[in-house]
Amino acid sequence: MIMLVRKLPWLIGTLLAVSFFTFMLVGLLPGDPAVLILGAGVSPEAIVALRLEMGLDRPLLIRYLDWLGSALTGDLGRSPMTGELVMDAILERLPVTVQLGLMAIVIALVMAIPLAMLSASFAGSKLDRVISGIGFALMSVPGFMMAIFLILIFAVTLGWFPSTGWIPFSVSPLDNLRNALLPALSLAMIELALYMRLLRTDLIDTLQQDYITLARAKGMPSWRILTRHALRPSSFSLLTVVGLQLGGVISGAIIVEEIFALPGVGRLLYQSILQRDLLMVQGIVLFIATAYVLVNFVVDLCYSLLDPRVRYAG
Amino acid sequence: MPAKKHPKIESRAQNFARALQQVFGRGFGPGFWLAVFWLAIVAFCAMFADWLPLRDPLDPVIANRLDGPLSGSLLGADGLGRDIFSRLVHGARVSVVIGLTAVTIGMIVGGALGIIAGYFRGHFERALMAVLDVILAFPWLVLLLALVAFIGQSLFAISIAIGFLWIPAYARVARANTLSVVQREYVLAAKAMGASTTRILVREVLPNVILPLLAYGLVAMGLVIIVESALAFLGLSVEAPQPTWGGMISEGKRHLATAVHVALIPSVTMFLTVLSLNFVGDRLRSRFDVKESNL
């Protein structure tokens, strides 16, 4: 609780800065938004009218405060291109991206934890070298390349999974998972390598602590030492990395959603950038960055709740 | 037991394992030199692409459409009948130029900010760290897409946009290193002798901070190549018709069912390049760390 109160001003400050940065980034894009929307060759009067309607004649700072004010009430404006409310458009596509991201993180963790445990308990062995080598190679493969090869193997050659498309979970849970597996897997592979590398180093460190030697001396079986004593302290740093890597997952989701034609937030952002739908871009960027900051804030809090060392030191 | 000792009697398999260990271990084994060799080839291609006896990378020969490797030309042709080998060589130029420029921009700007923050501390340091936190609050591709929309798609603009992404990382590394260097005796000695702040920064701090920054550079370059290719894959890197590896993979994606090589060849090329950069960078960095711990 004390932690929460102490960190709250920092959170609010960061969010304010993030929103301002988002506004400036998109607000400074070259070209008059009014001209972009109406297209070239429209009468100057029409452009002036739209500029007035959009409030483009007012100072930047006022426009920012105005925009922030309505953003706080959940109103990110209405896209002039599609006529959709920006917030509705995001919320409608959010479940796809969240499901994709969660599946990717879970898959990555499920694979990374046992592999890292194997690697760390036999550190320096052939097995460790092979596992670390694979992790090293995986880190040199961009997400889109992974996606293409998963499509090639599992969709084109074997035909087990569809290569594009999305079926909502509520319509058919099984088909939904079939459609989501390949995209999630392509995202998971990069995360897997990062998690594995970190957890391995961390575990090797932990395994050299005195209390592990004591547990060994007690005659505790190795696998129990690993799961009960070694994994717990390492899981905190893993949690932090999962939180920080969320940015990577979101970035990957943009590409993966585009490749697999999934109706998610990432694809919406990409399409909006191509169409120069500034209001939509602004809204999505703000939404993503805010979510990212909030999630990491919660991770930070969990960290101090779960780990007594941080709680008392802080 | 954290580390297992080698058994005394070694079977053939163990011998092999030890050979592998030497490759991946302390010394610069054959793997390292193989990676360096590959990088040298890529760099050579990037530099002399225009003068090598290659087919025109932009010339579509309809008769060659989707030709497989070794049928007429070395690596075949893509969906428009353009020569893949020639496009690879020309595409290397984009990757290498953007890799070098972006890392240099990140290193110089981020490094300078980090050193200044680490040396003077105080308000500047706090403000800088806060700004970096804000930049890091944006997923890299989101930030990059917005930046590219802002400054355009020329080779230079893309380099600047990707270089900007690297400023926070470099600033952090430089600051952390500066913090530890500033506490060393030689900095105190320089201060005691009345050296000016500029002199201390340039002559004492910079040489000791620049090595870890450079060691980080190769791995960063690998990542920059990945980032650029992702951008190219989305069609937002250097504008067509200039060939890029990411663009080639994107083009090959359409022919996955009929002509795998169109996507496979640029993918493998890029993978090998990034892997080599990571490998060489990692080796050099651990070499460097050893030196530092001996000091």
Image: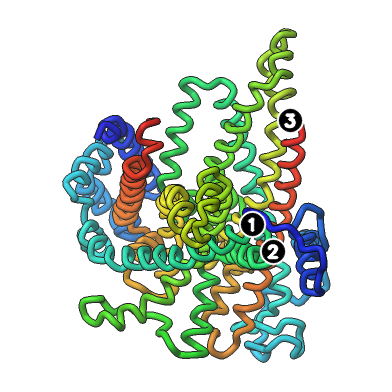
* Subunit under mark 3: B
Q: Quadrant of the C terminus of chain B?
A: top right
Q: Position of residue B203 (x, y in %)?
A: 74, 23
Q: Position of residue B258 (x, y in %)?
A: 56, 90
Q: Which residue is mark 2?
A: B273
Q: Is residue A74 above or below residue B291?
A: below
Amino acid type, residue under disc 1 in the picture: Gly
Q: What residue is rendered at 65% in x and 48% in y? A: B101
* Subunit under mark 1: B
Q: Quadrant of the N terminus of chain B?
A: bottom right
Q: Earlier in the sequence, mark 3 or mark 1?
A: 3
Q: Which residue is mark 1?
A: B222
Q: Which residue is mark 3?
A: B207
| Mark 2 crowdedness (10 Å alpha carbons): few <14, some 14-19, many ≥20 | many
Q: Are marks 3 and 2 in contact (CB under 8 Å)?
A: no
Q: Are marks 1 and 2 in contact (CB under 8 Å)?
A: yes
Name the quadrant containing residue B184. Answer: top right
Q: Position of residue A298 (x, y in %)?
A: 31, 46
Q: How many marks?
A: 3
